[in-house]
Image: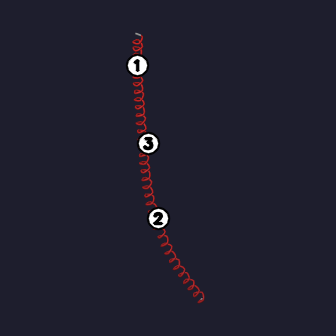
Amino acid sequence: SLLLEARAEADTDAKVAEVEGHKWLVQETERIRVTRVRLGAEVELTSKRETLTMEELDAAMAMAVEVDETLRAEETHLAEERFKKEELLNGEVKRCVDDSGKLAVEMAEKAACLEELIAVQHLELEEE
């Protein structure tokens, strides 16, 4: 009877240990599942952050390209304007040079006329 009692108690202890072991196993499985879910969420969040970062980089690159294209277009426009102004100035300089040449010829002609007039006046004075 004592043996049966001890055996029954041992069986009960074994069943309790089995139930406790099963509870522990269920708890550990749940803890692992929660950890996996949390890690999965962190991985997903990190992936989204990387995606956002890549999108931000792409947007920044697109903006930089746009700014570069705008600056190049403006630089080209300014170069064209400068070329037109240089052409106008070169034309103006050529006109001034031509005018100066014409004035020099006129002055030389007038100087020759004055010399001739002076010579004629000297002759007239000598004749008097």
The quadrant where residue 78 appears = bottom left
Badge 3 is on which residue?
53
Which amino acid lies under the numbered mark 1 shown in the image of this protein? Ala
Q: Relative to 66, does residue 125 appear above or below in the rendering? A: below
Of marks 1 and 3, which one's residue comes earlier in the chain?
1
Which amino acid lies under the numbered mark 3 shown in the image of this protein? Thr
**Local crowd at mark 2 within 10 Å, few (<14), some, or many (≥20)?**
few
Q: Is residue 69 left or right of residue 114?
A: left
Q: Residue 14: which disc?
A: 1
| 64 vs 19, nearest the viewer | 19
Q: Residue 107: which disc?
A: none
Q: In this view, does 19 lie to the left or right of 123?
A: left
- Separation of residues labelled 2 and 3 (CA atoms): 48 Å
- Separation of residues labelled 1 and 3 (CA atoms): 57 Å
The quadrant where residue 34 appears = top left
Of marks 2 and 3, which one's residue comes earlier in the chain?
3
